Every structure is written in C-alpha cells, then in structure tokens.
Amino acid sequence: MTATDVDPPNPAGADADAQLLARLGYRQELRRKLSGFSNFAVSFSIISVLAGCLTSYQIAMANGGPAAITIGWLLVGVLVTVVALAMAEVCSVYPTAGALYWWAFALAKRNKATWAWFVGWFNFLGQVAVTAAIDFGAALTTTAFLNLTFDFPVTTFSTFAVFLVIIALHGLLNTFGVNLVKILSDVSAWWHLAGVGVIVVLLAVLPDKHYPIRDVFLQTANSTGLSGTGAAVLAFMLGLLMAQYTFTGYDASAHVSEETHNPQIAAPRGIVSSVVVSLIAGFALLFAVTWAIQDYAGAYNSATKFPPAQIFIDATGRKTGIFLLFICVVAQFFCGMASVTANSRMAYAFSRDGALPGSSLWKKVNPRTGTPTNSIWLCVACSTVLVLPSLWNNTAYLAATAISVIGLYVAYAAPVFLRLRNPDFVPGPWNLGRWSKIVGWTAVVWVAGICVLFVLPTTFPITAVNFNYTIVAVAVVLGGAWLWWVLGANRWFTGPRHTADVTPDSAPLEAVE
C-alpha cells in the first residue's frame, strides 16, 4: 500500500475526480471522503470471512463436508478472483455509484436501456438479499453469544428479534454520514485481519487434539437425502454455496466510487484486493476451524444453532470460546453496516435514473449528512421483508444466501459479457491487457454454472418446510421487473439520466450520449 492509497489527494485531484464524474453525466452530490484503503475496506468488510465463512459454515458441514469447506473454498476463491478482475477492468472506465447497471448501458451495442433495467434489478435484488443474509447470519451468531453468556433463549422468534435490532442499528449508523462509515470501515478491516489471526493461532495451539489432516481436506458429507456417486457430487457442489456466498458484495468498491478519491485506480483495486485478501485470510480461518473440530456431529447439532461456536468451546474451553465468538460478533456487525452502505448507494443511483418505484423519494441526498438517507431505510425495510420467511421456513437463511449469490453474480457477469461483445471498448488506466478476454469468458461461464446450481433443491423429498424458495424469489423479482418493463417502463426508462452538463471532451465515455 502506497501513501497515495491512504492519504487524501490535493484539491487538484478532487477537481479531476469531479470532472470525471461530470463526463459520465453526474454532478458531485455525494461527499468524496474515502481513500483507496477505505474503498478496499468497505468491500473487504462486506465479504467478511468472519461473517460469511462462519455463518454459512453449517451449509457446507451438511453438504460437501470438510472437503467443500477447504478445497471448495480455494476452488471458488480462484474463480471469484477471475470475476473480480473482469469487473475491475470495466470499473476503471466507468467509476459511478450505479456501477453494474450503468456499465451494462454503456457497453451494450443494442437495447441499452433493456440491459440496464434488468441488470439493475438483479443488482438490487442481490444487494437486498446479501444485506438480509449478512444481518440474519449476524443475528444467529449474536444469539448464540447471548445464549452462552446470558442464557438468552435460542428460538426462531428471539433470533428474528435480534436481527431487527441489528439491521435498525445499521440503518442509523449509515444515516449519520459518510465520515462515520469511513472510520468504521477502516476499523473493520483491521478488526477482521487481527481477528482472523487471533482465532487461527488459538485454534492451532490450545486444543489437546486436532481433526485428522486428511479428513480436513478429503472428508465429505451428504444431507440431500439422495445416495450414490452423483448425489455425493451434488452435495459437494451445493456446499460451495458457503464460499460463493462469502465472496459477495465486493461490487461495493464500485458503488462508493463517487465518494472515493482517484476512483479509476482505487475502485478497481478495491474490488480485486478485497477478494484476494479474503481468499487468503478465509482459507487460514476455515482450515483452523475445521482442524479444531472435536466432535463433528456434536458441533453440527449444537444447542447454540451455530456450529463454529461449539467448535470454539470444544477446542479452547468455554471462556476462550466465548471470546472467539465475540470477535466474530463484532466483525459481523461491521459487515452488515458496510452492506447497508453499498446497498443504499446502489438504490440511490438506480433511483437517480428513475428505475425504482418512488424514485423521487429514494434519490434524495440529505444536505446535512451528504448521505441518501431515504434509500438507506428502503434497503433496511426490503431486507427485513426477505428475512420474514425465517419465522416459518428453516431453509430461509440458505435461500437468502442463494438469492444474493444469483442476483449479484448475474449483475456482475452481464457487463463483463457485454464488454467482451463490444469491439469499441477502450480500457481504462487499470486493465488486464492481453488477458482480458480469457479472464472475461471464464468469469461468464462460471457465473452461468452457479446460477443453475443454487436454485436446485437441497433436500429430498421436498416439503413445505425445506423447500428452497430461491427460485420463487428470483422469479418474482425478475417477473415483476419484466411485467413493469412491458407495461410501460420501456417507454420512459431510457437509461442513466444526466444531472450534469456533458462537455465535448467526454466523447470516449460511451454511456454519455
């Protein structure tokens, strides 16, 4: 990390950033307060290996087992890095808060507004779902912590109540202004790195015995209700949801690019570095946790409903285990706060271009705090609605994670696909050079595969209790967006609406027309 990554640039640099945004068609309305490190920290906090890896750990324990947890993490991490590289190249050219749907409009050769509309809705669905999944996962962890420290009951309703408190606090913290978000995001990045280090060291040193190394990498599990080699393969693939879900939200670096200094370099660098650092830190964490397992079945069926908590206690003792769980609780709180930040910026930008119902309300920026306050609370409300099925469906968390993966990754891959199909694309200062096409096509193929995988049933026979409603949620949002489009939006939604005069020297930026 160089000094220019963390130190605010001089006024001339700030003017250049505002001029670049004006070339893209927008006035500087949000406050540009984030350094390169802060931009990285927002995405790194949303990925949050102390949140995603651990709150979804039970998913891989049930299907795929330790093999999906360790080998699966590395497999998914490498392919997600490919997706991040392809996205970052586009971000360097178009650093706007709208990000993915804006890029789709800029890069499509035909039907620009149609591409922008549907990519935007997939992005909005993914952002809402990932916020819901993160904060519901944080509620699971926090409830387990409260149960161990204060004998707080672990029930469906108590977990939902904790979720409501957490997401309301995240709405409030984001309402106070970007300066607070910046400070907390920076603290979050260091908390995550230090927290992983503490957990890894203690889980390596304190247990009297460790799980066999061979089993850490090769043991499998299958809870699909099916049998045979094909079922084992399916179970392993379903277990990859743990890793794929954790590696979400790094588009946040693009969504806060209008608040970041030198965004053509800092934002793409934030996207890629957040994934790479998470890949390394996450593998160390997952290996340590899995290696520390004392009783696989006992951890999976723990009364806390949170297997890592039981693993911590079994391996290090009750007091140290609770301390390790506390590290995770704080990290997950930071993670959810950053997710609401990114979610609200995407909703603000989409509303700025008139694409959400009630856009005139959601696009408003609070003049005192410089934040899109109304969009913040819209995202809080939508995420709460998505978590409501948890009150009667025990696969709600799994479904929320799958919805976030599908919604976000469709939005991630679409601009990359359009960039590959656009011969007029001119790379920005951060680019992949001759590796651009092979990286891009690999990313598109991987995303197509996971979109099919994560709508499949996870348990057989299928019942109302275990039904994976991912496909329903995706279909409802996609069907609603399509219906709204054909009934009238196609006549008035023409893509990004400019809020600044476009100067003649902006010709290379294709979205400015």
Image: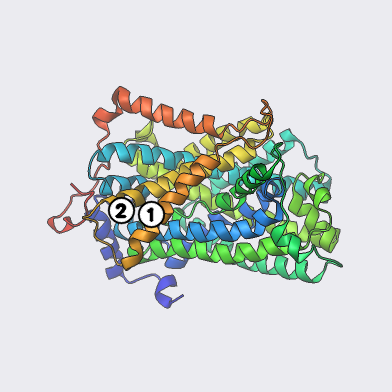
Give the percent coordinates (x, y) of residue 428: 28, 63
In terms of depth relative to the viewer, which is nearer, 287 or 88?
287
In this picture, residue 200 sits left or right of residue 267: right
Q: From this viewpoint, which residue is outermost toward the front?
A: 229
In terms of depth relative to the viewer, which is nearer, 49 or 28?
49
In this picture, residue 31 sits left or right of residue 455: left
Mark 2 or 1, nearer chain start:
2
In terms of depth relative to the viewer, which is nearer, 396 or 191?
396
In terms of depth relative to the viewer, which is nearer, 174 or 237?
237
Label 2 sits on a secondary structure element that is helix
Amino acid marked by disc 1: Trp
- Asked if labels 1 and 2 touch by Cβ distance under 8 angstroms, the answer is yes
Label 1 sits on a secondary structure element that is helix
Per the model, the C-alpha gap separating discs 2 and 1 is: 8 Å
Give the percent coordinates (x, y) of residue 47: 55, 55
Q: From this viewpoint, which residue is outermost toward the top?
A: 487
Give the percent coordinates (x, y) of residue 154: 78, 40
**Disc 2 target residue:** 420
Amino acid marked by disc 2: Leu
Does 336 appear above or below 120?
below
Does 203 appear above or below 506?
below
Residue 101 sits in which quadrant?
top left
Which disc number belongs to residue 441? 1
Give the residue displayed 30% in from the left and 52% down from the top: 419
